[in-house]
Image (tube, helix red, strand yellow):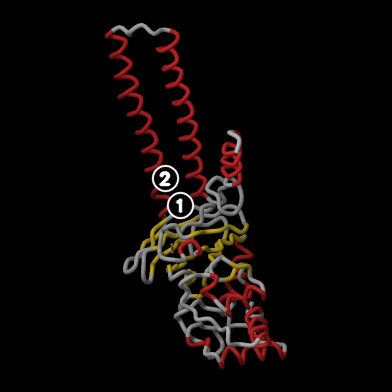
């Protein structure tokens, strides 16, 4: 490999990380903007310092190698070693500290409780006045233009909630509620990722972050609060029969039906989500079939058992039923 190759590879990796759905450098929310601003200022400062220091080294080794006078040396040490870093670090610290309380401000009229499970996200919406909460999973939808509060928990082990385009990360700790708030500004689809090692499928614990206009969000939430769609085709009805016969409702809830399990993700509006299995698969029937047949092959350690004893026709019917749960 030539010397230029690793450099090119690094540049490509760095640049590709600067845009897209999971980047702290492409902020789509107030909180992420603050972090990006801080990053760019620190990067700019580091570049200036690097140039200054190397300029100084060059000056004292090549241009004027004679020893400095004791007074000049003392001025350099006090100015460059004490005053300058104290001023710069104090300014950075004050900026960061002044922004921190805003990232924890209470929400305006929406609270979402998110629980880190092994290895998926339980998401319960608590709009003002709503009781019980509106149960969902593996997807966080938020409206633009308002601050929404997140209450974070974990069921077994520590996780960390992080949607880089929207804001910073916050740990999710079993037995203790942590909280943060987010104020998205740009509607779109973003990607979150568990940011704390939580076991064998930590890297496969992603989260879809969908930011909507307030009108779209209100319409979506109203639909999300409702019961599941009834199966309309014969194929979907066969799928529902398979769902019931296999006891899927023991672990999963589908509101409006007998399925009321709470161990696994709520499936009431599964078909309306953008991803499957906590961000690792697209919400498509082939993916649904692959997942149901052998979850452990796609997500090591997944608690859901495989259903590879089902025939292709049964799996296909089940996928049709689940896809219809929009
Ligand atoms: Cu959950 Cu890492």
Q: Secondary structure at mark 1?
A: loop
Which residue is outermost to the right? 233
In percent of the image, x 51 and y 56: which residue is there? 163
The kind of secondary structure element at disc 2 is: helix
Q: CA distance from mark 1 to mark 2?
A: 12 Å
Task: Residue 308 in the image: state x and y as whole percent.
Answer: 58, 83
Q: Are marks 1 and 2 in contact (CB under 8 Å)?
A: no
Q: Which residue has dot 1 on it? A: 168
As drawn, the residue found furthest toward the front would be 1
Image quadrant for the C terminus? bottom right
**Residue 260 location (% of width, % of height):** 49, 86
The front one of 19 and 132 is 19
Query: Is disc 2's CB within 8 Å of ligand 1?
Result: no
Q: Locate ligand 1 by image quadrant.
A: bottom left
Residue drawn 51% across the image and 43% down it: 36
Q: Which mark is residue 99?
A: 2
Side of 251 where 279 appears, left or right: right
Front one among 106 and 176 = 176
The mark closer to the camera, 1 or 2, is: 1
């Amino acid at each position: 490999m030539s010397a230029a190759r690793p450099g090119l590879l690094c540049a490509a990796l760095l640049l590709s990380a600067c845009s897209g759905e999971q980047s702290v450098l492409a902020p789509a929310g107030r909180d992420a903007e603050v972090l990006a601003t801080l990053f760019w200022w620190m990067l700019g400062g580091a570049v200036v310092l690097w140039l200054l220091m190397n300029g100084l080294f060059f000056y004292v080794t090549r241009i004027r190698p004679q020893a400095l006078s004791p007074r000049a040396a003392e001025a350099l040490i006090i100015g460059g070693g004490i005053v300058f870093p104290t001023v710069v670090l104090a300014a950075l610290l004050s900026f960061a500290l002044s922004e921190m309380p805003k990232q924890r401000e209470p929400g305006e009229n929406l609270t979402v409780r998110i629980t880190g499970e092994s290895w998926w996200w339980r998401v319960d919406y608590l709009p003002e006045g709503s009781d019980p909460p509106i149960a969902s999973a593996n997807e966080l939808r938020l409206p633009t233009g308002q601050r929404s509060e997140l209450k974070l928990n974990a069921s077994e082990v520590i996780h960390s909630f992080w949607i880089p385009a929207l804001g910073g990360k916050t740990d999710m700790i079993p037995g203790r509620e942590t909280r943060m708030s987010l104020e998205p500004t740009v509607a779109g689809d973003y990607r979150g990722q568990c940011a704390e090692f939580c076991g064998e499928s930590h890297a496969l614990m992603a989260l879809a972050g969908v930011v909507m206009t307030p009108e779209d969000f209100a319409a979506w939430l109203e639909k999300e609060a409702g019961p599941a769609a009834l199966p309309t085709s014969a194929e979907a009805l066969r799928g529902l029969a398979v769902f019931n016969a296999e006891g899927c409702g023991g672990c999963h809830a589908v509101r409006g039906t007998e399925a009321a399990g709470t161990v696994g993700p709520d499936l009431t509006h599964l078909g309306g989500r953008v991803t499957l299995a906590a961000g690792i698969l697209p919400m498509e029937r082939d993916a649904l079939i692959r997942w149901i047949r052998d979850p452990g092959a796609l997500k090591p350690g997944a608690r859901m058992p495989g259903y590879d004893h089902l025939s292709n026709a049964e799996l296909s019917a089940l996928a049709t039923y689940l896809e219809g749960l929009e």
